[in-house]
Amino acid sequence: MRRFSTTDADFAEGFRSLLLESRDTTARVDGVVAAIIAAVRDRGDAALCEYTLAFDRQDLTPATLRVSPEEIAEASAAIPHELAAALDLAAQRIEAFHRAQMPADLQMQDAAGLTLGMRWGALDAVGLYVPGGKAAYPSSVLMNALPARVAGVGRIAMCVPCPGGVLNPLVLAAARRAGVTEIYRIGGAQAVAALAYGTASIAAVDRVVGPGNAYVAEAKRQVFGRVGIDSIAGPSEVVILADAANDPRHVAVDLLAQAEHDEAAQSILITTDIGFADAVARAVEAELPTLPRHAIAGASWRDHGAVILARDWNEAVALTNDLAPEHLQIMVADPKTLFSQIRHAGAAFLGRNCPEAVGDYVAGPNHVLPTGRTSRFASGLSVFDFLKRTTWVMADRAALGEVGPAAVALAEAEGLQAHARSVALRLGQTAAT
């Protein structure tokens, strides 16, 4: 864990290194992924089955790629009641928040007499990638599938790898609760390729969303343009602004909640009180050995964690905007005032009793968020990722007469005579030759 103080002579250099450090620990896999995509595109189901046997130790046929309705129902029925209730509560809250985002169509008539509009429409089909094996996150199923369903997407196809043939029952239960019934037991770059290009057994989709490993991320990068994608997500991160009135252990555990994701995750505390900074650092060290994932969290905190001592909260806000974190916790007496000055953050959690972890599961806003400082230009997943906008114009002869001459003039200036004539003829004019 690194310690910084804005009063240090070398702070600017150290902070810049923090901003620019790469937390991508994977080697380049673009060549391997390109070969996998080409194989699936050319040989379809046969390539899917071959890769699934090689990578996930599953001997599948085209007929067994899809998880049966009976398997989904059986897995859902086996979930303990309290977990089923927790899934349902999370789903209700996520669905309600995303339903409130749905935009209205636009129609207006301008002074020239043209009627102008914008119509929203859902994508036809979406592919949802869900990590499998040890990294099984039913919460991500809800966060990705429910906005698509709320948006009105007609078809949601889900791919989940099943190493050794093991399917996580809670993932299937979450899919069922989110209304997803089309589930395939495949993963990796081959699953992304199948969703993008289609096979005999899996119809192509219009957008692929969901997290995955380096191979999945690279596959999404390579199929972008053929289909839409949500983002190329990197390691998770949190910045916590906390004053000395907080319980140091609360802040320490909040930092470790990010650190336990993986070794490349990043947790940063910014405070104005050196005594509190020391207390939190001690609390982190005391808490670490008690965590089941202490090795992962410890590596993250050691290699990427930071505690920054700022002169005041204005300076702390400026540092936060530079960091542009995926998650931001503001744990001060008046969090809304500080939040009003934040320009860049994927999601913010305000107050001493609103840890980021509540946002991962049950708060309602989406937990799929921009990482690696991309909140400077990107936003979290929402219904808008599953909607398209179509603009439209309606004009009669009188309205065209008001604006048409300007269109003719501009088209002629650009040397596009057919453009000019298409308007001029309706105006009874002769366009230039």
Image: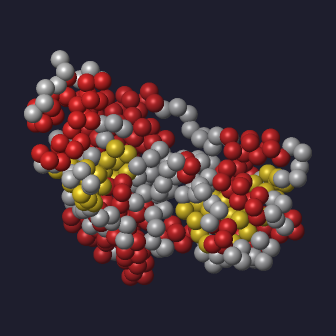
Q: In the picture shown, does residue 194 fall above or below 238?
A: above
* Model colouring: secondary structure
Give x and y (percent) for residue 106.
27, 60
Give x and y (percent) for residue 42.
24, 29
The answer to which of 431 and 364 lies nearer the viewer is 431
The answer to which of 16 and 116 lies nearer the viewer is 116
Q: In the picture shown, does residue 41 fall above or below 142?
A: above
The answer to which of 41 and 109 lies nearer the viewer is 109
Give x and y (percent) for residue 326.
57, 56
Can the viewer see residue 67?
A: no
Q: Is residue 340 left or right of residue 199?
A: right
Total residue callouts: 0
The answer to which of 74 and 410 lies nearer the viewer is 410
Q: Residue at x 81, y 59 (%)?
A: 310
Q: Residue at x 59, y 41 (%)?
A: 24
Q: Residue at x 38, y 45 (%)?
A: 229
Give the quarter of the figure containing the C terminus: top left
- Determine which quarter of the picture holds residue 256: bottom right
Q: In the picture shown, does residue 251 fall above or below 405?
A: below
Can the viewer see residue 238?
A: yes
Q: Residue at x 33, y 36 (%)?
A: 225
Give x and y (percent) for residue 9.
90, 45
